[in-house]
Image (cartoon, grey):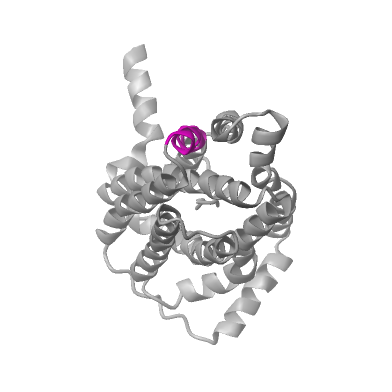
Amino acid sequence: MGAPAAAGAVLSSTFRSLRHPSYRRYFIGQTVSVIGFWLQQLALSWLVYRLTRSPLMLGVVAFAGTIPMLVLSPLAGVVVDRVNRRTLVLVTQSTQMLQAFALAALTFTGTIRAEFVPALAMIYGAAWAFDVPVRQALLPVMVGGRDDLPNAIALGSLTMNLGRFIGPILAGGLLAWAGEGWCFLLNGVSFLAVLFALSKLPSVPPPGLPGKWRAQLADGFAWVWGFLPARLLIANLALMSLTVPGYQSLMPIFAAEVFGGDARVQGVLISSAGCGARQPVSSSAFTITGTSQGT
């Protein structure tokens, strides 16, 4: 086999899940949406910093956006097993889109206030807590089974890292040129791409699991506690979540007060983390992903 043929075979294998039209539409839409997510994340932190100059307030907004994941995620898995999954993901994505449009409207009209932001961030986080597990549950539907599922998950990681690299750079330039409102508006518009892709999926009714939701929730906790690899993975995820992402919420202070720059410097600093991230896109790699936006 010649080098071009071998390279073509590797490329075909690496992106093989894109042969499924449902997943291909979702992959394109999700790529656009992840970039929009980072537009909003940077704009939100820069807006709070501009309004308050308070590190505490930056931390409050970051906490408000992430605490729903901790509180609601266990319940989200139970809900996903009991409702139509396509309907649920359309609801969660639409909620996040409306939140972005609300931020854009408040910013453009000059009525935005710092105390509004934590509540809006919490709405986004609550929708995200349900959005991540339901999108993961829909992946087998998009790729027609489990054969291409590991590849689809790996490509999802590629999308997350690509958006994490491109989005902050675009956000920094847009913030400096046009302000936060346009970042919020573009994020809202970006949801249309993934909503279109998800609307084309077939209806996915609940599997009709017997038993009460409390028992199912307890069984989930018992399984995680009794299965050492899962317990270690959850512990590692909790530790990383508590210690790593916090720097992002303080990045406007570093950009403006430490480096004497503006939103463009903030964008470069956040984008550097995405540039340094490396995620293998192997067809045999099975990667568990989660956001973020930011799944």
On screen, residue 51 above or below 265: below
Q: What stretch is highlighted in magenta?
A: 165-177
Frontmost residue, 239 versus 245: 245
Residue drawn at 41 percent across, 80 percent down: 208
Residue 176 at x, y percent in the picture: 49, 34
Left or right of 6 on screen, residue 220:
right
Residue 289 at x, y percent in the picture: 54, 49
- Say which quarter of the image contains residue 268: top right
- Say which quarter of the image contains residue 89: bottom left
On screen, residue 260 above or below 193: above
On screen, residue 259 above or below 53: above
Which residue, as the protein is rendered here, is positioned at the far top?
2
Residue drawn at 57 percent across, 74 percent down: 75
Residue 58 at x, y percent in the picture: 66, 52
Residue 178 at x, y percent in the picture: 42, 39
Whether residue 211 is visible to the viewer of this picture, yes or no, is yes
- Is 234 inside the magenta-drawn segment? no
Q: In which quarter of the image is the N terminus?
A: top left
- Is 170 inside the magenta-drawn segment? yes
Whether residue 286 is visible to the viewer of this picture, yes or no, is no
